[in-house]
Amino acid sequence: MSRGDARDRLVQAAIDLIWTSSYGAVSVDAICERAQVRKGSFYHFFASKDDLVVTALDTHWGTRRPVLDEIFSASRPPLQRLQRYFAHISERQGEVREQYGRVLGCFHHAVGSECVQKPTAVAAKAQELSLALRRYLETALRDAQAEGALPPGDPVAAAKSLFAFVTGALTQARVHDDLELLRQLPQTAWLALGMAGPPQRST
Amino acid sequence: MSRGDARDRLVQAAIDLIWTSSYGAVSVDAICERAQVRKGSFYHFFASKDDLVVTALDTHWGTRRPVLDEIFSASRPPLQRLQRYFAHISERQGEVREQYGRVLGCFHHAVGSECVQKPTAVAAKAQELSLALRRYLETALRDAQAEGALPPGDPVAAAKSLFAFVTGALTQARVHDDLELLRQLPQTAWLALGMAGPPQRST
DNA sequence: GTGGTAGATGACTGTTTAGTCAAGTTCGAG
DNA sequence: CTCGAACTTGACTAAACAGTCATCTACCAC
């Protein structure tokens, strides 16, 4: 009945509590209580609070990755990947709102912007995942340029701009508990690339 | 020699410490030590930690406001206001980096995205200032539309988009301690409005 | 000079924090 | 059945935490 059951509950409790408040506001005791696991067991599975949080970030990313892999599948036209991604964001945050009662934005991004100033393992992990996410955009933009769907230019810089826009919208959505900006993302995100609107059907 | 001297030092210490790390990571003791003020004096001036932080947010905003008022002066053409604002952001963050050793992004925005999930006085204040900042953009966009420098449309929605882009760029700059995105803001921010580049000189 | 007030001080409280640990339980492999 | 490893437990520590308080000091108005 055990088999890492308590471990999983701890990880999930950490994700839930930190995402719905913040890294600094969540204590080991609170995580243990939510997971119905005793303090001793916590430190049987994890060396420290930070160790758990790094695992939580990884675990959460592990659930998002297959979704992103599908959306950014190379078998799809590159601009269509982006279009699906923008649509996905508001759908996803709608689900998050149903589940948690509030718009929460991006988990590792929230943790990251709170923790980066001190070079801890948590900060490094959050930065790593942030970069990993940006690379999906980068690849799509590069592919779009390669097939002429987008004018040539630095795909890294374009991805940074687009990423800033998307993460900014997600943070605003979190701060104001408002999905409106995200719902408009499929139309407005293209602006960050200098395009007036979603691309037309291509071959 | 006193006259609220210790009080000012406490406020400044709170700004410095919280901005360079986070709300949750900074204790009253740490603020007192940095300000060279004893615990008792702290609670002579402030009712609680949150009370100080609200004051710190207000004080910091008080130093930014005249700068924004100048930049967004109604005596300037509206698009030029925005252009100056975008240029100001990277200049300002350059100064911040010199002073604090790192790019820190926007103070109240960092506090806000950490604290909004629990409805505290700090969260309310951060949201209030975030809104106040966005209104500068809104006004400039409305004025731009009124004089035909920008096509008609919902200025509130446009301001939200632009604001998401700007705050996203600031947060990315903070997370990666990188001014590059901000330096490009005078060129790229216009994209969020559907304009390819900075506006040409108008009458 | 006297009294009042604004500020300063350091010792104090009670709680919460991250993390430890020795002694237990469960359970499957040999 | 037995052994050891995986896991659980609750009591423990030491530090950090926010906040309190009586007492002291400096200075200004009268």
Image (cartoon, coloured by chain):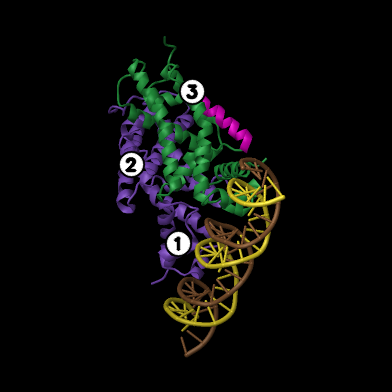
Chain colours: A purple, B green, C yellow, D brown
Marks 1 and 2, the one that precedes in the sequence: 1
User: Marks 2 and 3: same chain?
Assistant: no
The verdict on a common chain for dots 3 and 1 is no
Q: Position of residue A12 (x, y in %)?
A: 41, 59
- Residue at disc 1, secondary structure: helix
Image height check: is A52 above or below B74?
below
Specify whether A139 is left or right of C3.
left
Chain assignment, label 3 = B
Q: Is residue A112 visible?
A: yes
> A76 or A51: which is nearer to us?
A51
* Chain that bears disc 1: A
Q: Please, what is the three-letter code of the amino acid marked with disc 3? A: Ile
- Disc 3 target residue: B71
Res. B139 image quadrant:
top left
Q: Residue at x 33, y 29 (%)?
A: B156
What residue is shown with label 1? A31
Q: Nearer the viewer, residue B200 or D20?
A: D20
For residue B167, above or below residue B142: below
Of tags 1 and 2, which is closer to the observer?
A: 2
Q: Disc 2 versus disc 3: distance between alpha carbons?
A: 29 Å
Q: x, y percentage for residue B33?
A: 64, 50
Where residue A178 is drawn, which disc sits there?
2
Magenta range is: B86-100
Inter-mark Cα distance, 3 to 1: 47 Å
Is the residue marked by circle 3 packed among few (<14), some (14-19), or many (20+) residues within 10 Å?
A: many
| Neighbour tally class for label 2: few under 14, some 14-19, many 20 plus, Cα within 10 Å | some
